[in-house]
Image (spheres, rainbow, N blue to C red):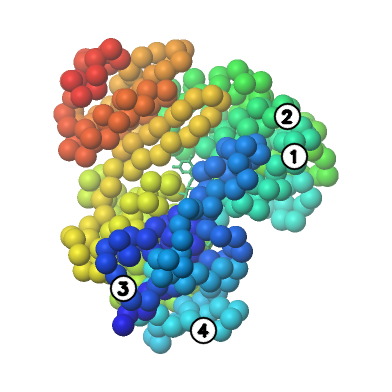
Amino acid sequence: ERNVVIVGAGMAGVQTAVALREGGFRDRITLIGAEPHPPYDRPPLSKAVLLGQADGSSFDIDFAALGVELRLGLAVTGLRADVRELDTADGPVPYDVLVLATGAEPVRLPGTDGLPGVHLLRTLDDAERLRPVLARRDDVVVVGAGWIGAEFATAAREAGCAVTVVEAADRPLAGVLPAEVAAPMSGWYAESGAELLTGTRVASIEPGAVVLADGRRLAAGAVVVGVGARPATGWLAGSGVELGPDGSVTADEGLGTSLPGVYAVGDCASFPSARYGARLLVHHWDNALQGPRTVAARITGEGEGVYDPVPYFWSEQFGRFVQYAGHHAPSDTLVWRGAPAEAAWSVAWLREGALVALLAVGRPRDLAQARKLLETAARLDPRLLADPSVPLKKA
Ligand code: FAD
């Protein structure tokens, strides 16, 4: 009998257990998670859960019926691969096959740990601490205009809070999207009544105020820090599992790691993509759904066991449904479909005439068609592509 142990009971860990059972794996599965709560889904935390429209977002999965042993509220602190054992506060846990699914941790602002009124938004506990902030309509300052910052600002405006978003770069999502695509997104903040301060740095946070590098003080009943996330892999230092400079477990094309019998999946793992000619570290939900199928297939010996997805994610911000599929590089050719002043538009990226990525704002049909075209790296006619009235699949 093989004993599979999965570390991390988020989307990727849970889906690995589910995929193993779906793949006919009958042996032992243990799922260990540091958080005390029944495993839950994260995207609702910055949306319905924050606004109190949903109590929680637990996965609707009967782990006992699946034959999965859950060990919650238990952090794994070390890996001793030579004897195939994990260290925990409850003593050592042996494994035959190990799946690393510890996700990511939000990056903190230096010197703000434990400061009252300073929040992160990653866990259910974080969301529960932020709910009363919204309910009281406190003035909030959001640090970072990334995906989390935009979604939190959206919810806080909806709740009626005064919202100021401080962003060091000259635009929102600077690390992800080129300036011409991010430019219209800046306007979404103002339109919702949130103030966006770009090119602005936080110098310090004091009780009730954020002090900016230029000396300005912003009153803040609460501060929400959304400046990115890093793989939660600190506990693997010295274990022999290879980590990259970004902190990710550098998995191979089948999500195997540098150690035999050890796999990595979800937000904690990067993988080489032959499709895009790059190593990808994807911090999105769909990756935590698809990756586990490859890992399960590798463990059960079914299927080809190669993971080279077309990445996909969505974000709900300022009343808009934003979706992105694929992966683009700065050198790819950008084609607009529709005008950014309109309610709905898309942007496509071509590489040597083939579609490599698409961003859709309020155009879910474009996105759905693009996902299929991206699978085959279809060549598109840029003139037809630029016409939003021509269905993407006919371009
Ligand atoms: P996680 O969900 O981070 O789960 C990892 C789990 O492992 C955690 O519960 C952690 O406590 C546990 N763990 C960590 N270290 C240890 C240890 N040493 N021992 C034991 N347990 C450990 N993506 C989208 O595509 N669209 C969205 O709209 C979207 N919205 C989001 C909103 C929020 C607020 C957040 C935080 C994320 C959102 N995402 C979204 C991203 C998506 O939720 C993540 O990509 C996904 O949760 C990754 O799953 P994971 O299982 O790899 O990691």
Q: Residues within 10 Å of mark 4 (few under 14, many from 20)?
A: some
Q: Residue at x 37, y 60 (%)?
A: 18
Q: Is residue 276 above or below residue 249?
A: above
Q: Residues within 10 Å of mark 1 (few under 14, many from 20)?
A: many
Q: Which quadrant holds residue 336?
A: top left
What's the distance in space between the residues labelled 2 and 1, CA to CA? Answer: 9 Å
Q: Which quadrant holds residue 339?
A: top left
Q: Residue at x 21, y 33 (%)?
A: 373
Q: In the rendered structure, which amino acid carries the disc numbered 1?
A: Val
Image depth: mark 3 or mark 4 in front:
3
Residue located beneath label 1 in the image: 133
CB contact under 8 Å: marks 2 and 1:
yes
Image depth: mark 2 or mark 3 in front:
3
Sequence-wise, the earlier of marks 4 and 1 is 4
Query: Please, what secondary structure does the residue beneath circle 3 have?
Result: loop
Residue 248 at what x, y percent from top left?
43, 59
